[in-house]
Amino acid sequence: MSADLPRAAKRPRDENFPVASLVLSREHRDAVLAFYAFARTADDIADAPDLGAAEKLARLDALEQALISGDAAIPQAARLHAVDGKHKAGLVQARELLRAFRQDVVKARYNDWAELIDYCRSSANPVGRFLLIVHGERSSAHGPTDALCTALQILNHLQDCGRDRERMGRIYIPIRWLLTAGSEAAFFDPSRMALRREVLDAMLDRVDALIDQAQSLPEHLQNARLRAQSIATIALARRLSRRLRQADPVLERVQVSRIDACIAFLRGLRGTVHKPSSGDHRVTAAAVRRSGSSFRLGMQSLSPERRRAIHAVYAFCRTVDDIADSAAPASEKRAFLREWRREIDRLHRAPETPIGRELARASSLFKLPLEECHALLDGMETDGAERVRLANDYELGLYGRRVAGSVGALSIRIFGVPSAHDFALDLGRTLQLVNILRDVDEDAARERVYVPLARLAQLGLGDAPAAMLVADPRFARVCETLAEEARAGFAAADAALMRLDRRALKPAILMMENYRRVLDRLQARGWGLRQGRLRLSTADRLHLITRAMRPA
């Protein structure tokens, strides 16, 4: 059979990520190179353009039998067989990879995210498991290693999406996701960049969440050299994700640069000297930094422990909100939100994500009511629907309680003012009214209308496509009414603060003043002359800081 094997199309140095870098010891590097050579051979068989499906499957079967027996006629198989004899790793993981390569031969499309993840369990995760066993690592590293391998596999799928479709007729972007851009043909249409961009970014959101889960991997690794390679690999994964957000992989192959690789390698080398501590809090802090939220100003005034806890709450809110707002299919959004429900339910046992672990820590320190996290998820399920309408004021109030009141109820406990519970709920409703008024056009583009249909009906305006509703002059009249209610809400909050600890509530006050300023700007602009989302200037932000610092 050896004469029938295709020549390897790629070498270790051609890969995006470290395969058997010089950081690893000679013994371990040799074992990894043996595993790579076998996997590369199997991959080349599955991808061979001149072979039919039956022939590919037959050759993969023969390769597996050679691996099991250690057949010297197939050097790649014999070498890995010997590695397994020495390290007790190689056969199980390679046979799992062969399962994925057989699947590549007969399956060219994936229906949804769950199917893609299941494929990655065979096509990517065994590689990480092999590395761990060869290095004698603990089972605690399995979870973050699997997350990293899955992330790397999907990044490769996105990177090669145009080439895979053109050369092999395979598409790893799930069918349901492609359909949000209209169709498979529409997604790959070079002129449809905007629609394609939304889908790619939604997938990269999921990949980034996997990379976040992998962030804790280095701290679980005892072998300093493997730890260094893991740090470099995580850094390169983040870099490739960022590059894929900036470029279009349908039009060009997006890659990390040599400079990227050098920077990642240097980071890895630092990891051989200093074993990193938990990266969970860095994940949540990074989510706050990326947001650019004015709420950051208030967070900085908190003590380190309270700030770390509010970062966890904010990162959770930001993550589930991004799910609801993404271009992922509605059914996938529901599935991702269900995953978060399960994570909230296991916070006091064994959370699996960095945000979950940080939330568990915050909950333990500040007695957070975790039912509020479920309330927020209820609100995100509303937002994630294909079409959103609220029938009446009751539904508007319930929606506001879920998406804003829940955040307030969690936050005031971290601020140390649980007596301000009612203040937090009332302020949350007010802030949500401002959100609704600010985001009318952005929401309409997603077929969302949060102004209650009952209020529109009072002016003779019935339900219709969102773009038509918000363009009607009568819609502006209802917006003015909601603005006055928000104005009254701010006045009530001012009165409540006379009886509360303003110093402890400084972060909430900063948020309140930010939204009050937004409302001022919205009313000054007028409800019939919207021109995109309103953003505050530097002068506005200085103004809100001044108001927030004002004594009672």
Image (tube, rainbow, N blue to C red):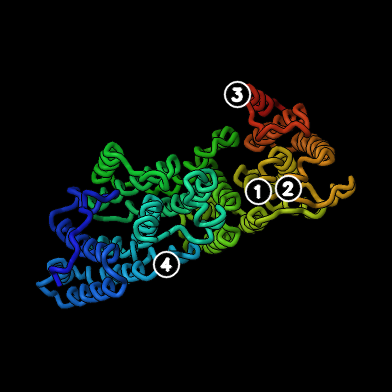
Indicate the secondary structure of the residue bearing disc 4.
helix
Residue name at image x 69 percent, y 34 percent: 515
Quarter of the image with the N terminus is bottom left
Mark nearer the N terminus (2 vs 4): 4
Residue type of the residue flagged with mark 3: Thr
Which residue position is annotated with label 4? 118
Residue closer to the observer: 128 or 80: 80
- Does label 2 or label 3 sit earlier along the sequence? 2
Query: What amino acid is labelled 2 in the image?
Result: Ala
Real-space CA distance between mark 3 and mark 4, rounded to the nearest whole angstrom? 48 Å
The residue carrying pointer 3 sits among few (fewer than 14), some (14 to 19) or many (20 or more) residues within 10 Å by Cα, namely few
Task: Give the residue pinned by disc 2.
Answer: 466
Q: Amino acid at mark 1?
A: Arg
Residue at the image position 75 percent from the left and 53 percent from the top = 389
Which quadrant is home to the C terminus?
Answer: top right
Q: Is residue 270 visible?
A: no
Above or below for 264 versus 152? above
Disc 1 target residue = 446
Q: Which residue is mark 3?
A: 538
Q: Residue furthest top?
A: 539
Distance between mark 2 and mark 3 Cα atoms: 33 Å
Q: Amino acid at mark 4?
A: Asp
- In this picture, is 466 found above or below 516? below
178 relative position to 501: left or right: left
Q: Residue at x 50, y 55 (%)?
A: 185
Which of label 1 and label 4 is nearer to you? 1
**Cβ atoms under marks 2 and 1 closer than 8 Å:** yes
Of marks 1 and 3, which one's residue comes earlier in the chain? 1
